[in-house]
Image (tube, grey):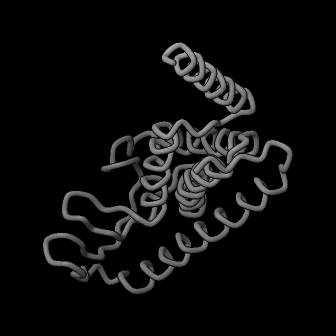
Amino acid sequence: MKNTSPKRPRDRVAVFVIVAVVALLVDRLTKLWAQAALADGRTIIVVPKLLGLTLVHNPGASLGMGSSVTWLISCLALVACVVLVYLAMTTVSLWWTAALTLAFAGAFGNLIDRVVFAHGFLNGSVVDFLNYGWSVGNVADIELGIAAVLIVVLLLANVPFSAKDMKESQESKEQSADSAESRGADGR
């Protein structure tokens, strides 16, 4: 899992573009479908008591929180998108690039909705249609969730984020190897 390439920024750009384009396309196409197929207000049951399809325009964040400050949520999403692009381009790991790009695509997909369906400055709603019974979300939300899980896995696996982290990881391995050698020599 430690795919790192500090000297190949074009690899990171390629991963960013491919992941972002695919994730954004899936999000946009599913939202367009939901708006066309579910506009009459009906709910389609996919898996009873687990998943249905219901069109909702959510002005807030998760679970509808922050509905009165949609413009602030939009501004925070914009800042998050810029930071995620920066981080995805500066990491030395293609795994980190992919995870951060997926988070970017999810945040940007919902930001697109807030701009397209705005009733004022960044005061729009997000198209949600995946009805879990306790919450209604969309593909961008799933992308954000997958990105969060990937980031936790990368952290737990100690996948280096920067060249400095990679150097420290290599030095730590060398010290461990030296330490094991000295213990082996003393035990003879």
Is 95 situated left or right of 6 in this image?
left
- Residue 143 screen position, x and y as percent: 48, 59
Residue found 45% across the figure and 66% down from its top: 139
Residue found 33% across the figure and 69% down from its top: 130
- Residue 24 screen position, x and y as percent: 60, 67
Where, by quadrant of the figure, is residue 112 drawn? bottom right
Closer to the camera in the image, 35 or 83 = 83
Where, by quadrant of the figure, is residue 171 drawn? top right
- Residue 87 screen position, x and y as percent: 69, 40
Above or below, 144 relative to 40:
above
Residue found 24% across the figure and 81% down from its top: 46
Is 134 situated left or right of 139 in this image?
left
Which residue, as the protein is rendered here, is positioned at the far top? 186
Residue found 20% across the figure and 78% down from its top: 47
Is 55 situated left or right of 32 in this image?
left
Above or below, 33 relative to 1:
below
Above or below, 137 relative to 8:
below
Is residue 119 at all visible to an observer of this figure? no
Disc tally is 0
Which residue, as the protein is rendered here, is positioned at the far left? 49
Is residue 83 at all visible to an observer of this figure? yes
Closer to the camera in the image, 179 or 43 = 179
- Residue 135 screen position, x and y as percent: 26, 58
Which residue, as the protein is rendered here, is positioned at the far bottom? 37
